[in-house]
Image: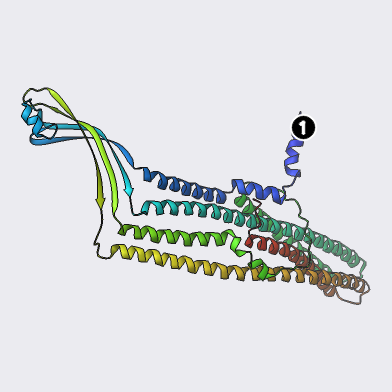
Amino acid sequence: MKILFYFLIMSVSVFAITLDELTQYAMHHSTVVKQSQVQMDLSELKQKESHVQQYGELNLVGDYTHYNIERTLAPLVPTSMVSGSPVTTSKDLFYVGASYAVPLFTGFSQTRQIEISNIAKQMSVAKMKLTKEQLVYNVRSLYLSVLAQREMLKAQIAYRNALATLRKQIAYEVELGKKATIDLLKAKSNEQGAQTQVAVLANNIDITKATLSALVGRQVGRLESLSIKVKTPQYSVDRLYAEANSLAKIEVEDMALRKADKTIQKSEASKLPQVNFSSSVGKNYGEDIATNKWGNETLWQAGINIKWNIVDFGKRDLSVQQAKITKMEAAFKKEQTLLDLRKLLTQAVSKIQQSYAEYLGNVSQLKFRKKSEKIEEVRYKNDVSTLNDLFLAKSQTQLVRAKMIESRYDYQKSKYYLEYLLEKGVDE
């Protein structure tokens, strides 16, 4: 049992998490997605609210009124006066009943509000997709940053170890009198500089992992390596832009235009008559002043109310004008979104091409730098060149190696960014 428990504990730290596992976890647990889900739920509730408002209101009502002179429990009519029956009167009247009111015609204002709430719900769904796309891209970007820094750290450690080996060799040759003491001091200085860079890279990895953990909503441990295949980019901005109308970000702007149209129609609805139905039923209670006995009367009524605002001194026209300006703003925003999309697509494709060219250049440079470094090692051993020449060759090799690593991961980041713009990061 102890062995099994130990194995389970060790497996947590040994098994690394993959990029797909991390993005899936983030889409279900990230607070960013949860906030977007809350907004979507809120839109759905507002949609339901708009629908139920067309059914009116049923209320239980009650009141108590004290008068300075006695009142009848029900209005007097000729039949009650002719019959001669005693009429209950009281200064204190109690009423208990129910009322129901429903709009019969609102100039289609209520219909437009339902349509607006339906569009708002659709917009919240599209925005949820955009939120997930943004989240997936951010997770991918940070994930690649950690992998790149980790690979750079590994290369830097190898570089530091190589300098340590060189320092030991120089120290031995100093003892034999073959090398000057100044060479040993230079070797120690360069080794310390390499060690400092190791610490910097390790700290950067911790910081990036902390950022990634906060984004996905869990503590991130060891990350699984990612296979990156650098291929010749073959993208056409025009072809990619042709797919723009099907993107959620453009659909959101289209829905904003439709919503603005419905808002204009809703504002114009106030120019039409408003028709409402209302009814009530209840009982009046009171203590008869003459007999000191409690009496009651049942009352009910139903009616239709029509209200048509003829003159409001331009208030409705101003409301309509505001709605039209909002529509113009939505149209301009859609146009700008399309312009920005083309610009971003151009930048993304150019960045992929640039990263690809830099990677090929760095790979080629690294081959030459390695050869130069080996030549300088031989030259230094034979006292043909100085230690500074050897350190310069080694540092240049390490610099090109770091650039090669960075350009390879930048290439993949650029591809992920293009997928983000085209909304292909989230599998539906």
Q: Is residue 219 visible?
A: no
- Decide which of 136, 42 is in the foreground and name it: 42
Q: Is residue 420 toward the left or the right of residue 66 in the image?
A: right
Q: Toward the viewer: 421 or 299?
A: 299
* Residue placed under numbered mark 1 in the picture: 4
Task: Return the residue nearer the eye: 153 or 67.
Answer: 67
In the picture, measured across the screen, residue 7 lies left or right of residue 293, that is: right
Q: Position of residue 238 (x, y in %)?
A: 66, 71
Residues packed near mark 1 inside 10 Å, few (<14), some (14 to 19) or many (20 plus): few
Task: Please name the residue shown 74% across and 33% down the image.
Answer: 5
Badge 1 marks a residue whose secondary structure is helix
Judge whether 72 appears above or below 241 on screen.
above
Using residue 91 as the reference point, say whether residue 357 is left or right of it.
Answer: right
- Mark 1: amino acid: Leu
Residue 76: quadrant of the picture: top left
Q: Is residue 384 visible?
A: yes
Q: Give the quarter of the image for residue 112.
A: bottom left
Q: Where 304 sits versus 299, above or below?
A: below
Instruction: For the N terminus, give its image quadrant.
Output: top right
Render colour scheme: rainbow
* Residue found at x 82% / y 72%: 365
Would residue 242 be found to the left or right of residue 366 on screen? Answer: left
Residue 99 image point, x, y percent: 27, 37
